Image (cartoon, rainbow, N blue to C red):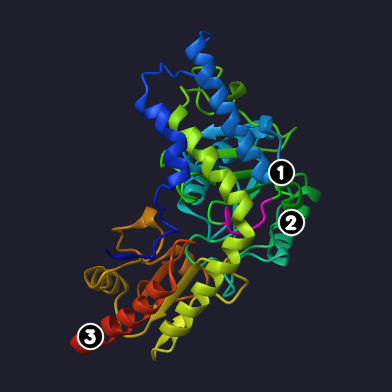
């Protein structure tokens, strides 16, 4: 079996989530949660239980949770829904190190004439409050939304979301926090986070793929984007995937409960792996700011990143060259470029991402195999 160190891309379905989903996949249940008959209401009860579990993990109200197809849709709903509800021409501010789910929507808005400002994450890897303050000061008109992720999906660098939210609110703007990589590894009490919208994904925490959620603070105005039904209190139309939502709820309950333990355990493993790989000459960590516990992004001198990822795969270690959503792209990581790396250094970078299921033995073996692969690739150049 390969050593899987790409948990930032996706995680295996946990036994807890699988067991919760099993009845909805194996029994002959007509599970449309919008139907008024007995089977429909049975499905509705299961969905609402999952909503309550997710809300409890966030210290939120269940009524503030909207189930969607994943964090990509959650981000798009948050951005487009907020902008549609805002004053005409109100600006959008995003971190230049955001996931493509945010940046591509921002680029479309900009093409349509909306003012868009991109915050420089700097070499630390996350926009500072002073950078946001300067961006807000540069805009004379209204600002609708600021979007900054909690934990960067490539580097693991953590932003000061409460401080950024305070600045956004002072200007009358809402703040969107993509917390996909933080869930299960950081406290995500939405009241302490101070954000107005929080995007989450099931398959990053041991839940099934194809389902996510957007937390919307009570009172935040949002125009629905998926039309055609009254599901999710009219905020997102479409038949709910009951089995997937049930699995998400089960995984979310564990993620909320175990976040502190996960952070301590996985952080120690990540630090051990970092010690091993950065002991190799020419291997340096990307990003100098505070990090979440599961990410390790490094650049490897005199080695092409894609070649390194492929060679590691052959050696039995599964990692990535950056975001899974950009896999196959020949372009260097936009996150690392925004942090100031040149194209060659960005292309020569790889991301390890660990999980509570990662073992000490896997870390030790991965470190040894990584050193061997780097040496062989350099020798072949």
Residue furthest to the left in view is: 380
The C terminus - image quarter: bottom left
Residue at position x 52%, y 44% in the image: 251
Viewer-side residue, 109 vs 221: 221
Is the magenta region chiefly helix, strand or loop? loop
Whether residue 148 is visible, yes or no, is no
Q: Residues within 10 Å of mark 3 (few under 14, many from 20)?
A: few
Using the numbered discs, state the Cα–Cα distance from disc 2 to disc 1 in whole angstroms.
16 Å
Q: Which residues are magenta?
A: 182-188
- 335 left or right of 365? right
Residue furthest to the right in view is: 170
Please name which of the two marks, 3 or 2, marks the residue nearer to the observer: 3
Q: State the residue position of label 2.
A: 162
Residue 376 - label: 3
Using the numbered discs, state the Cα–Cα distance from disc 3 to disc 2 in whole angstroms.
46 Å
| Residue 151 percent location from the top left of the image | 57, 60
Residue 59 - label: 1
Element at badge 1? loop
Element at badge 3? helix
Residue at position x 48%, y 65% in the image: 335
- The reply to whether the magenta stretch includes residue 184 is yes
Element at badge 2? helix
| Residue 6 percent location from the top left of the image | 39, 62
The N terminus - image quarter: bottom left
Residue at position x 75%, y 59% in the image: 163
| Residue 238 percent location from the top left of the image | 47, 23
Using the numbered discs, state the Cα–Cα distance from disc 1 to disc 3 in whole angstroms.
50 Å
């Amino acid at each position: 079996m390969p050593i899987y160190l790409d948990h930032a891309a996706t995680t295996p379905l946990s036994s807890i989530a699988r067991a919760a989903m099993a009845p909805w996949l194996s029994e002959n249940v007509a599970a449309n949660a919008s139907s008024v008959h007995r089977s429909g209401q049975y499905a509705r009860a299961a969905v609402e239980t999952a909503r309550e579990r997710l809300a409890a993990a966030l210290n939120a109200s269940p009524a503030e949770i909207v189930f969607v197809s994943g964090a990509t849709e959650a981000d798009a709903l948050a951005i487009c829904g907020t902008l549609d509800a805002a004053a005409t021409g109100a600006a959008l501010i995003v971190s230049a190190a955001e996931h493509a789910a945010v940046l591509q929507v921002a680029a479309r808005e900009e093409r349509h004439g909306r003012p868009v400002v991109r915050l420089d994450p700097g070499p630390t890897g996350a926009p500072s409050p002073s950078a946001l303050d300067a961006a807000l000061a540069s805009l004379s008109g209204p600002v609708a939304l600021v979007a900054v992720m909690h934990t960067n999906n490539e580097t693991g660098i953590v932003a000061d979301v409460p401080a950024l939210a305070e600045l956004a609110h002072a200007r009358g703007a809402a703040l969107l926090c993509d917390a996909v990589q933080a869930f299960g590894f950081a406290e995500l009490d939405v009241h302490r986070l101070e954000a107005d919208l929080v995007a989450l994904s099931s398959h990053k925490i041991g839940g099934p793929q194809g389902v996510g959620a957007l937390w919307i603070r009570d009172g935040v105005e949002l125009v629905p984007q998926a039309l055609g039904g009254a599901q999710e209190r009219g905020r997102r139309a479409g038949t709910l995937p009951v089995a997937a939502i049930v699995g998400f709820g089960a995984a979310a309950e564990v993620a909320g409960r175990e976040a502190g333990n996960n952070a301590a355990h996985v952080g120690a493993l990540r630090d051990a792996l970092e010690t091993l790989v950065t002991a190799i000459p020419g291997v340096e960590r990307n990003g100098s700011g505070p990090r979440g516990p599961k990410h390790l992004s490094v650049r490897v001198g005199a080695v092409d990143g894609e070649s390194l990822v492929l060679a590691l795969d052959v050696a039995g270690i599964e990692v990535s060259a950056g975001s899974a959503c950009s896999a196959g792209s020949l372009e260097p990581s936009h996150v690392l470029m925004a942090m100031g790396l040149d194209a060659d250094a960005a292309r020569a970078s790889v991301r390890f991402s660990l999980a509570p299921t990662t073992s000490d033995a896997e870390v030790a073996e991965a470190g040894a195999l990584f050193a061997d692969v780097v040496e062989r690739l350099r020798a072949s150049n």
